[in-house]
Amino acid sequence: AAKAVFDEVDEALGEKLSTLIWEGEADELTLTQNAQPALMATSMAAMAALKAEGVTVDKAAYVAGHSLGEYAALCAGTFSLADTARLLRIRGRAMQAAVPVGQGAMAALLGLSFDQAEAVAAEAAQGEVCQVANQNDPAQNVVSGSKAAVERAIDLAKAAGAKRALLLPVSAPFHCALMAPAAEEMAGALADVTM
C-alpha cells in the first residue's frame, strides 16, 4: 500500500522522487522543492499502510496540519494525491526561488517568550527581514529571514537569556515576508486545482 503511494507520486512528478527519498543525497533531498513532496508522500504512505492493516480515519471529523502538513491534511480528502504532489513541487520551487539557498535562514529560540522573541527579531533585523515565524510552545519560537539577521537574532537571544538558540537545517526562510513571491505563485497554482 505504501509503495503504491510512492509510485503515484513518482508518476505525478514525472521522476523517481522515491529513489531520492531512499537512496539519494541528503543535500538534494532537503532542498524544499524535494523535501515538501517527499514529506507529504511519506505521510500518505504511512496512512495507506495503516489503512491496509485495518486502521481507518474514514470517520474523522477533522484532519489538520501546519504549513506543509496542511497539504497532507488536504490530501486526505480535498486534493488528489497526484495534485498534492504537483502542488508541493510548485510550492517548493517557488519558495526556493524566492530566496536562493544560503541567503535565508531559520533559528529556534528556546527559553524566550513570544514577546521576547519578537523584540529579538526586531532588533536583529537592522533593515533586513527577521520575523517570528512560528510559536511552537510558550517558550519555543522560531525566527525566519535573511541569514545575517537570523544569525544576529541567535546572538541577541542568547544575550537575552535563551536556553538555546540554533540555526535550523532548512533550505529557505519559511513563514516570513521573504516568501511573498512564493505565495503569489501558489495562489495561481491553487486556483487551477479541483478540490
Image: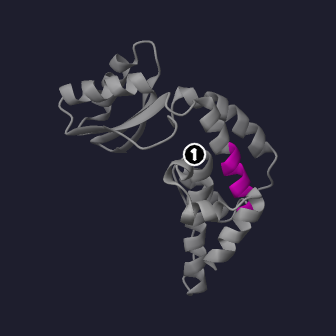
Quickly name the residue at label 1: 32
Q: Please tell me which residue is depicted at 64% across the width and 33% down the height of the picture.
A: 97
Q: Quadrant of the N terminus?
A: bottom right
Q: Observer-nearest residue: 31 or 117?
A: 31
Secondary structure at badge 1 equals helix
Q: Please tell me which residue is depicted at 71% across the width and 63% down the height of the picture.
A: 10
Q: Quadrant of residue 38?
A: bottom right
Residue 31's x, y, as percent? Answer: 56, 45
**9 left or right of 73 in image:** right
- Neighbours of disc 1 within 10 Å: few (<14), some (14-19), many (20+): many
Is residue 85 covered in magenta?
yes
- The count of marks equals 1
Residue 158's x, y, as percent? Answer: 21, 30
Q: Amino acid at mark 1?
A: Thr
Taking 124 as reference, is 158 above or below it? below
Outermost residue, bottom direction? 54
Residue 189's x, y, as percent? Answer: 76, 43
Taking 66 as reference, is 6 above or below it? below
**20 left or right of 90 in image:** left
From which residue to which does the magenta span run? 81-90
Q: Please tell me which residue is depicted at 42% across the width and 36% down the height of the picture.
A: 106
Can the viewer see residue 40? no
Taking 156 as reference, is 109 above or below it? below
